[in-house]
Image (tube, helix red, strand yellow):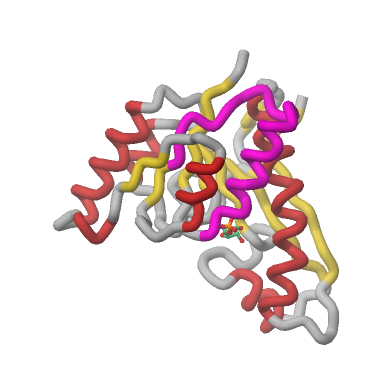
């Protein structure tokens, strides 16, 4: 069955675009029913408009507390009747109540080979650490930060003259392959979470 996908993004939305393109190419048995963003300036909104996907803005700064923001976000997410929520550069940590409302239904992409380099500036952390291989990880979201069960990873070499920016670009190319692929597997009902491991059937 064609799955209902909701994308959450805060910024430029190149991963969102990769998902839009894969859906348009018929590679994913699903469709994007909405973009939800916390940032009214996000370029992702323009991408949604171009693809005729409704954009819902829930601006963090317009709420008196984090709790109120999360309640509004949860309500907006519940309204969508989504099968899958995709965090495509959504720059806030999802609160416990949201994660618990959609177990096994939220996936994230992180620009590092987890469990290395969680949190912000993962590519800079990789360059500073001196690793020779870096990459990206698509994983289910649970209550931990960047530590839910891993669906897919793709790796790239780290070159001796890399800085944060050049490495981020090389990783981003792999993100644009890994994310649509993981979403395709989800939409084909081929992912089974077994403890920390995700089985691909
Ligand atoms: C990506 O590097 C992604 O891994 C991280 O945030 C960045 C978002 O980029 N979570 P974009 O908005 O998809 O272009």
The structure residue drawn at horizontal position 67% and vertical position 78%, both measured from the top left corner, is: 164
Q: Residue furthest bottom?
A: 161
- Quadrant containing ligand 1: bottom right
- In the rendered image, which quarter is residue 75 located in? top left
Vertical order, 151 against 37 (above or below): above
Q: 17 or 136: nearer the eye?
A: 17
Q: 96 or 84: nearer the eye?
A: 84
Q: Is residue 171 toward the left or the right of residue 118 in the image?
A: right
The structure residue drawn at horizontal position 61% and vertical position 54%, both measured from the top left corner, is: 14
The residue segment tinted magenta is: 12-35
| Percent of width and height locating residue 58 | 30, 48
Q: Residue furthest front?
A: 50
| Percent of width and height locating residue 169 | 72, 68
- In the rendered image, which quarter is residue 131 located in? bottom right
| Percent of width and height locating residue 56 | 36, 41
Q: Residue furthest top?
A: 1
Quadrant of the rendering where the C terminus is positioned? top right
Vertical order, 112 against 3 (above or below): below
Vertical order, 116 against 60 (above or below): below
Quadrant of the rendering where the N terminus is positioned? top right
The structure residue drawn at horizontal position 36% and vertical position 34%, both measured from the top left corner, is: 77
| Percent of width and height locating residue 104 | 52, 32
Q: What count of labels does the image hold?
A: 0
Question: Any magenta on residue 28?
Answer: yes
The structure residue drawn at horizontal position 84% and vertical position 84%, both measured from the top left corner, is: 160
Question: Any magenta on residue 18?
Answer: yes
């Amino acid at each position: 069955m064609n799955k209902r996908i909701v994308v959450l993004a805060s910024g430029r939305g190149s991963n969102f675009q990769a998902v839009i393109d894969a859906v348009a190419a018929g590679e994913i048995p699903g469709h994007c029913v909405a973009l939800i963003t916390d940032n009214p300036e996000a370029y992702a909104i323009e991408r949604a408009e171009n693809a005729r996907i409704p954009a819902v803005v829930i601006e963090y700064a317009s709420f008196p507390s984090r709790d109120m923001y999360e309640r509004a976000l949860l309500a907006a997410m519940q309204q969508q009747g989504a099968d899958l929520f995709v965090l495509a550069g959504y720059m806030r940590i999802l609160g416990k109540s949201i994660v618990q409302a959609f177990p096994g239904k939220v996936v994230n992409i992180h620009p590092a080979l987890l469990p290395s380099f969680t949190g912000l500036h993962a590519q800079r952390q990789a360059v500073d650490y001196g690793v020779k291989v870096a990459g990206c990880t698509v994983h289910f979201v649970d209550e931990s930060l960047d530590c839910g069960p891993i669906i897919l990873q793709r790796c790239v070499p780290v070159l001796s003259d890399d800085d944060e920016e050049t490495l981020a670009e090389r990783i981003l190319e792999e993100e644009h392959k890994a994310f649509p692929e993981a979403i395709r597997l989800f939409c084909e009902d081929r992912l089974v979470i077994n403890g920390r491991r995700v089985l691909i059937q």
